[in-house]
Image (spheres, helix red, strand yellow):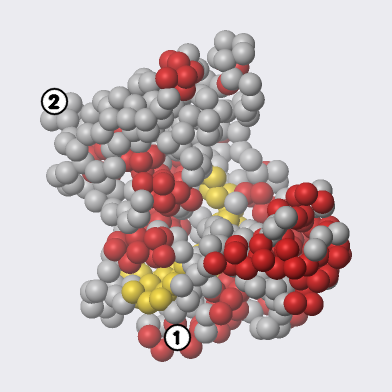
Amino acid sequence: MVLDIRAARKVSRIRQRDLAAATGISVRELMRLERGLISPSEKLLRQISNCLGMDVAQITIGQNQLFENPLTGEGYATARPQNNQIIPRRKPLDCTKKPVIDLFCGVGGLSYGFEMHEEFQVVAGVDLLSDRLQTFSRNHGTANAYGQDINTLSTDILYNENPHPFVIVGGPPCQGFSSIRPFRNIERNDPRNNLAEEFCRIVHNLQPEWIVFENVVGLLTHSNGKTFQTIVEAFEEIGYRTAAKVLNAAYYGLPQCRERLIIVGSRAGKPFKWTQPTHWCEHRSMAGRQEFILKPSKGLIQDLQSAITVDEAIHDLPEVEAGGRATTYQCDIESTPYELFIRNGAQQLKMHEATAHSPRMLEIIRQAGANIYALPEGVVKSGFSSCYSRLNGAEPSVTLTVNFVHPASNRCIHPHQHRALTPREGARLQGFLDTFEFIGTRSQIVKQIGNAVPPLLGRTVAQAILESD
């Protein structure tokens, strides 16, 4: 029987971490072996075969077949990057603007928010995935776009081919947080290096005036807060005075309750002045440590605008049925101020195409309510409380996921129509202008939107840096 490593491990009923420990390799290396992204040595393959109680010759054949057609993923452990891919800037630089470099840029939502201020200009972005990089390049014309694993990226390239950065921004994926160590212990060739350390390395080498590190709120409580504290200490060790808060984008004009942890650092030791919320809605924060949540005092809430609602963000888009699409805007409806802003003068409606749901799924959607418990008993057999749920048009959206076009994902059924959100509606709720161009297949674009940092949150941080500098 021909089996590759993963199939053989499943047959033997051995967990990934146990096999990695037994053979003396990291879980990351085993993940890459099981996807066919790297080829094992003969010695390692014999070790693995012995641990699994399998014939090494049969596993060798299976692994060779897998290597010919690898199962690539989209994370740093499972992707096969096109190293040294460079998309050059298309527009000349403006030397009067403050240069921004975006690490782990994705489509560049965070840095796009910086460019909403005329004082900033994005000059470079780095990402692992080609489709994200193409979207980033299309919307950041003055930036060089580098398609490279950041672990192999030399800062000499960033230094020689771009202006000295005033700000470096980025949100490293959190896969490596469990192994993070103080910055002083980093060895460049150490395979345990994680992505937060690589961000710190590039900052240390390029010495921008400001840094912006964004990440999931759960980083605050990872390893009982030790991971967060280590990252802060690493920035301070290389000379940056830091400040950290959890920002809810709904408090700054986004029609979505999306929280992100933001760490800002100043090389000159300047105190950072956080921009105070402009909007308000009731929201239960995911942050376990309340002192980090930035929200207005109770006495000021009545002076703030109500948070933008889902209806205020998408009601001007034409109705479409499941499986349908629309390419023209409605002319007989008055747009809200947010809709006028987000449309940004676009003349052609793009990406307003709904998923074609099965008859059974359509029946579930017709009965959907605020949570899975609104469905009649037995309609669905499993799912989290927020699955198969309808958005409330009179409130901001819940946090979008990378599967928001599928009803089984976190609450993403249209408030009034019997279907999940379209990519255009998701982009609206994320704060991407209708003129922002996404490159890739529909499924890739949905992931690009769901993974992005809302540009309006980037704009908020950029404004605060201008006021603090």
Q: Residue at x 66, y 49 (%)?
A: 218
Which mark sits nearer the N-terminus, 1 or 2?
1
User: Element at badge 1?
Assistant: helix
Residue 148, placed above or below residue 426: below
Find disc 2 in the rendering and name its residue. Answer: 332
Residue 469 seen from this side: no
Mark linked to residue 347: none
Quarter containing the N terminus: bottom right
Q: Residue at x 35, y 36 (%)?
A: 422
In the current view of this chain or complex, which residue is farthest to the top?
Answer: 376
Residue 64 seen from this side: yes
Left or right: 202 in relation to 320:
right
Of the residues shown, which amino acid type is indicated by label 2? Answer: Asp
Q: Residue at x 28, y 30 (%)?
A: 324
CA separation in Å, label 1 and label 2: 52 Å
Residue 364 percent across, percent down from the top left: 49, 18
Find disc 1 in the rendering and name its residue. Answer: 157
User: Element at badge 2?
Assistant: loop
Residue 292 percent across, percent down from the top left: 64, 49
Image-quadrant location for residue 307? top left
Residues packed near mark 1 inside 10 Å, few (<14), some (14 to 19) or many (20 plus):
few
Of the residues shown, which amino acid type is indicated by label 1? Answer: Ile
Count of number-bearing discs: 2
Q: Residue at x 86, y 59 (%)?
A: 53
Image-quadrant location for residue 26? bottom right
